[in-house]
Image (cartoon, rainbow, N blue to C red):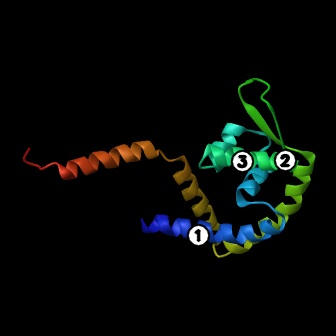
Amino acid sequence: MEAYLDLIDAATTVDSLISRPLIHNKVTLGQFRVLSTLLKAGPQTQQGLFERHFRTEANASSTLAILERRGLIVRRGHEADKRQRMVHLSPQGHAFIAKLMPKQTRVVRAQMAALNGREQNTLRKLCRKLIEGNPTRFIAELTLAEREEETPKDW
């Protein structure tokens, strides 16, 4: 539990530092994450953005609607699967995030400088491991272990 709380505290600290310049540009951290993902990875499905960045579908819909109203993204039908919608950076959105990204990168680099290169690489690997882990299996194993603890041995 302590490792988890430390992880949350570290993420909150970095998010707080990153958020300060965003407020000046009238962008939330969630909006920034969507725009930076689109800049780095190119067009994404709405579902893919939802799974990566949001806790609720309402939050995702609201964020995308705001970015679309501001002219920073464009949503189009998926070429191969008409049930899906693709989210693209608009030219204005590309210019906006490309201008904002260097400042944000400097803030993150300054904070990450507390770790040397090897430590940063280890941190990244550990985070990927947590992201890609199998929580369903772990919860099932934990539940089984808890049941075994509650069951008297002489039954």
Q: The disc labelled 3 sits on which kind of residue? A: Ser
Q: Which residue is mark 1?
A: 10
Circle nearer the viewer, 3 or 1: 3
Q: The disc labelled 2 sits on which kind of residue? A: Arg
Q: Nearer the viewer, residue 92 or 123?
A: 92
For residue 125, side relative to residue 84 (left or right): left
Q: Nearer the viewer, residue 63 or 88?
A: 63
Q: Which residue is mark 3?
A: 62
Residue 41 position in % (x across, y down)? 77, 45
Disc on res. 43: none
Tell me the SS state at disc 3. helix
Q: CA distance from mark 2 to mark 1?
A: 33 Å
Residue 20 position in % (x across, y down)? 75, 71
Q: Is residue 116 above or below residue 35?
A: below
Q: Nearer the viewer, residue 47 or 104?
A: 47
Name the residue located 70 percent from the left edge and 56 percent from the top edge: 30
Q: The disc labelled 1 sits on which kind of residue? A: Ala
